[in-house]
Image: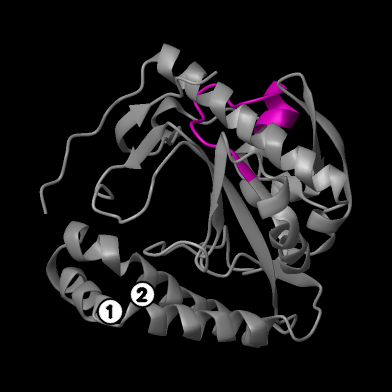
Amino acid sequence: MNTKKQHHLTSEELKKLQNVELELLIEFDRICRKHEITYSIDGGTLLGAVRHGGFIPWDDDADVILTRNEYEKFLLIVDQELNTDKFYLQDVNRTSGYRWGYAKLRRKNTDFIRLNQEHMPYEQGIFLDIFIGDNVPDNYISRCICNFRSFIYRKIFYSEVGKFTASGISKYLYKILNSIPENTVKNSYNRYVKFRNKKSTELVKCLTFPACNRVYGYKREWYEDTIDMQFEGVTLRACRNYEDYLKFLYGDYLTLPAIENRKVHPVSKLTFPTDN
């Protein structure tokens, strides 16, 4: 595999990127409000709304989250409601070659290609991450087992990238995991998701996304009890108890991190829409 060099965003490109991501947030919010689908802005997007009134100045992505039930409602209407002149939705069941346990709403006529993912066989436009909260056991031991099983699925999915980027024994293990046929992995994962959601629980988690700590779960109410919140001059939905949620995620969330800890996505290609 021929890896490309990382493209470092200029401040002008970062602002243009955030403007496109705001488009995606507005479209997602429009659909959810029209059909009474409950969601919350999430992660750095929620932190940015609270701490900066919008994007964290150096942030290069946008995140929302909703429970599995709400996501299923979203899937039922998205093909009729989505402005397909500008946007498209990807998830593990809709998109061949897509290997992530959360969905992405993307902007047409753009590129945001992650470094070392140039070979992935699907379109990679500028995106909004749509995280899905699946039920996880309230019992801690059972939840740890659930987290380990989810970790295995995550590594199998990631093996399409890891077989190129890892080194040593990890590279060898990723190659073994990558030999499992895509349909086999996806069918197994879908059965696992169905199993996890048979019983409602107090805690939920995006199964194939790393937990922020060893609790391995998040309060369901954080994603189901939401309020309006301003973000870059528009109104989006956000966790009502955002203070507790952000403390859980980040600790002292009002203090800016050191410059060296301000993370961005390594990207090899970035292009912007020409149809505005």
Q: Secondary structure at mark 2?
A: helix
The figure's colour scheme reads: one colour
Q: Is residue 37 visible?
A: yes
To which residue does mark 1 refer? Answer: 177
How many C-alpha atoms fall within 10 Å of the one at disc 1: few (<14), some, or many (≥20)? many
Residue found at x 51% / y 80% = 189
Of residues 141 and 83, the one drawn nearer to the viewer in this rendering? 83
Residue 253, can we see it? no
**Which stretch did the figure color magenta?**
48-63
Question: Would you say residue 275 sits in the magenta stretch?
Answer: no
Question: Which residue is at a point 43% across and 31% down the rendered structure image?
Answer: 109
Residue to which mark 2 is pinned:
156
Work out whether 188 lies above or below 204. Answer: below
> Residue lying farthest top?
12
Q: Position of residue 203 (x, y in %)?
A: 75, 71
SS majority, magenta = loop
Q: Amino acid at mark 2?
A: Ile
Query: Which of the two labelled residues, at mark 1 and mark 2, occupies the earlier sequence position?
Result: 2
**Quarter holding the C terminus?**
top right
Q: Nearer the viewer, residue 3 or 27?
A: 27
**Based on the displayed image, in which of its 4 quarters is residue 194 positioned?**
bottom right
Residue 119 % position (x, y):
23, 53
Disc 1 marks which amino acid?
A: Leu
Residue 28 position, x and y percent, is 70, 42
